[in-house]
Image: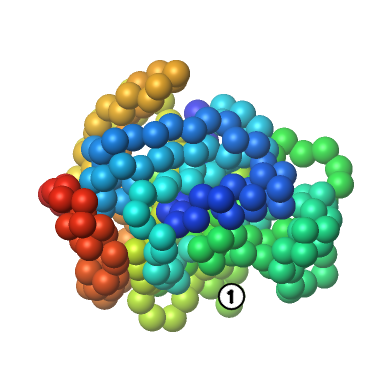
Amino acid sequence: MASRRALHFVFKVGNRFETARFYREVLGMKVLRHEEFEEGCKASCNGPYDGKWSKTMVGFGAEDDHFVAELTYNYGIGHYKLGNDFMGITVASSQAISKARELEWPLTEVTEGVFETEAPGGYKFYLQKHNGPQSDSVVKVTLAVSNLQKSLNYWSSLLGMKIYEKDEAKQRALLGYADNQCKLELQGIKGAVDHAAAFGRIAFSCPKSELPELEELMKREKQTILTPLVSLDTPGKATVHVVILADPVDPKGSKLLDEAMAADKSDEWFANHKRPKASG
């Protein structure tokens, strides 16, 4: 699985001005590209919305060899209800800690040398002191799971990730495709995982030739495929081929997501703008 790589995490943002300030001025990331769209993405990149939206890629370096953030903004949607699925991104950067202090951005030291902060919208980031050279400042993405062993089987046995660490007592595991890449940390929680309206996605790359076989594997294993293999044209870049999957969920997960989307402001926005909403 050496050819696979962690690419980016997708955030829905309601305030682009404050969000841009956080990523550029606090974290020190650069805007890598920005695109505007008049209608929803056919792979639901921007969520269950069919109106005007934008996508901004930000990171510490080029998308080809850095883990970056994809910031999706739906015009007319100013806030998204957070769930308990996204638990944080850890960034190794003493400079980010210094900039947060300089800009008086709220910081809380949770362990020695590690500080918790929040991006606009409530997304948690953990900044840890680091001064030496490194291939990528983004260390790991932490996601909640309701059944750690079931999720480990999914990510490791089906998707081929290496398990770097596993702690049964703390219900925690660290996985990845390579030593020098951003890792995926799974943290077991009690109760259901609630994705709410702000639910994000983590993206990985793999050779195009592997995608049909991967999709068939998921079908055989009776796993959830949110979006079957589809091609997405990206301005200035090669066409991207995508399969969107869902890792194992608890029985209440679907109900919680439906409730969150029903409470979202998207229906009101589309009604006011006299735009039809995309079929799910």
Instruction: Please identify the quarter of the rendering in which residue 194 is found.
Output: bottom left
Looking at the image, the residue that sits furthest to the right is 131
Q: Nearer the viewer, residue 3 or 85?
A: 85
Residue 94, percent across and down? 82, 52
Instruction: Please identify the quarter of the rendering in which residue 45 is found.
Output: top left
The residue drawn where x is 57% and y is 27% is 64
Tell me if 262 is positioned left or right of 249 in this view.
Answer: left
Q: Which residue is mark 1?
A: 170
The residue drawn where x is 53% and y is 72% is 171
Q: Nearer the viewer, residue 126 or 40?
A: 40
Q: Is residue 21 above or below residue 232?
A: below
The residue drawn where x is 63% and y is 60% is 125
Residue 69, percent across and down? 54, 44
Q: Is residue 134 above or below residue 199?
A: above
Figure label count: 1
Residue 77, percent across and down? 36, 57
Q: Is residue 161 above or below residue 31?
A: below
The residue drawn where x is 31% and y is 28% is 232
Residue 164, percent across and down? 61, 53
Judge the density around disc 1: few (<14), some (14-19), many (≥20) Cα neighbours within 10 Å: few
Dot 1 lies on which element?
loop
Query: Is residue 61 shown to the viewer in this render?
Result: yes
